[in-house]
Image: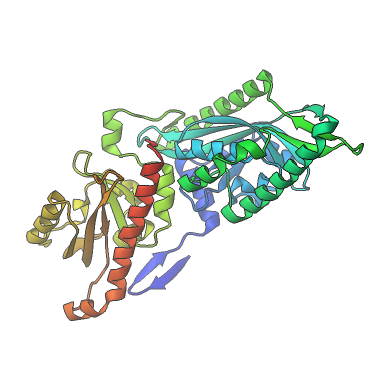
Amino acid sequence: MLVEGGSRMWSVVSKEEQLEESLNKAYSDGIREALDQFKYNFVITDPFLMDHPIVYASEGFLKMTGYSRGEVLGRNSRFLQGPDTDRRSVLEIREAIRREKSCQVTLLNYRKDGTSFWNFFHLAPVFSKDEGRVIHFIGVQTPIQKCSRLCTSKHVENDIRKQHESSASANINANASNNLIYFGSCRRELCRDFSGDLGHSRLQNSFLEDDHKGRLVKHACEAKESDKQKAIAAISCVMSELAHFSKYTGKSVSDTRCDSADCVRVSPIISSSLTIALSRIQQSFVLVDPHLPDMPIVHASNSFLQLTGYSRDEVLGKNCRILQGQDTNKEDISKIRQSIEAEQPCTVRILNYRKDGNPFWNLLHTAPVRNASGKVAFYVGVQLDVTGMEDNHLDKGMTSQMKQLGAVGAVRVAVRSLLEAGPSR
């Protein structure tokens, strides 16, 4: 679908097209048909789409949960949670995603009809071999058939019931206010708030139920070794299929990150959590890493790609000089370099070029992004197309320039909060 905006035509990609492209672009056509052959219960998610949605759900997963494919695709996996889902387990999954690591937890989930079921959940990241970044996550759910039951004694029965009721109420309120999810970035303060309290209010991997005889029954579920082996086998098979189909696109994937110097030089790595946070900033900007050779671009916003005509793959790992051309003023370039050397902000009106060769006047604002210790972690460059605008008109257009400064502030908040939460590369 094309929408007219100013003097240009912007291409607007629908949510359905994003979901379709998420797998096909990485693994080539036919990947869904190949994945449909597996009997495992699993989903594949894309951390670079808004709200980290499911982009593929297996038939086994659909039968297990009672949902149709249309009810699952495009949704975050939080819809499987319920009042007795253990929040510590949810946070463990979220932390694994933030750190781009595998994790395994025993979890109570809920079907579409509201009935609960225990499953051994195995999460695994899928890395691009060439770029080293996470492009998808695989989540395998292995049902646990039997759970132990243990009746509580009479003299502690009432205390446990009160504790359980208080805990359930607190968890429901927390779920509504904080919007806890499986797949998404974990804010540090959210983890802190829950990690200190849950140890006293919940029984991990268990819940309480009245057995209709005035007694409370504790249901405890632990995965058997056979359940764990099934999950590992599922991850291995799905990963093998993804790796096979990815070769046809020339962008191979792996279950481990490429940490070689060559890999980092080609396409520098930032965490998927930071990428998600940055993707919410609706301005044209890039983030560059001054600690890597040639200060490459490590993140480019969608608005930047629309403005310049480049694809994300064409700009990641490249220096911003790709926007320069034969009539770009050398003094403007020198001014930007001097500001970077001095670790100071800079605003300059510079002639840049789009991918198709057409020039445009860019009101560029660059600024350092510092970590908690005050050292420069990145530089951000925010672009504003001012083609055809006179200087005196620019002075009056403070709203756009204030948006530029707002974008810089938003980038700094995103980087600072995630860097403080701990390294994830």
Residue 97 seen? yes
Residue 358 seen? no
Number of marks: 0
Q: Where is residue 16, by image quadrant?
A: bottom right
Q: Position of residue 237 (x, y in %)?
A: 57, 26
* Left or right, residue 169 beside residue 181: right
- Which one is in front, 55 or 181? 181
Single out the residue that lies furthest toward the right.
Answer: 213
Q: Position of residue 44 (x, y in %)?
A: 56, 40
**Depicted 322 relative to depicted 98: above or below:** below
Tell me what residue is drawn at x 68 percent, y 38 percent.
Answer: 61
Tell me what residue is drawn at x 43 percent, y 43 percent.
Answer: 272
**Depicted 364 relative to depicted 294: above or below:** below
- Which one is in front, 149 or 228? 149
Quarter the C terminus occupies: top left
- Which one is in front, 230 or 287? 287
* Left or right, residue 339 beside residue 284: left
Single out the residue that lies furthest toward the front.
Answer: 155
Q: Position of residue 223 (x, y in %)?
A: 68, 25
- Which one is in front, 392 or 157? 157
Q: Position of residue 100 (x, y in %)?
A: 45, 36
Q: Where is residue 209, by image quadrant?
A: top right
* Left or right, residue 408 beside residue 20: left
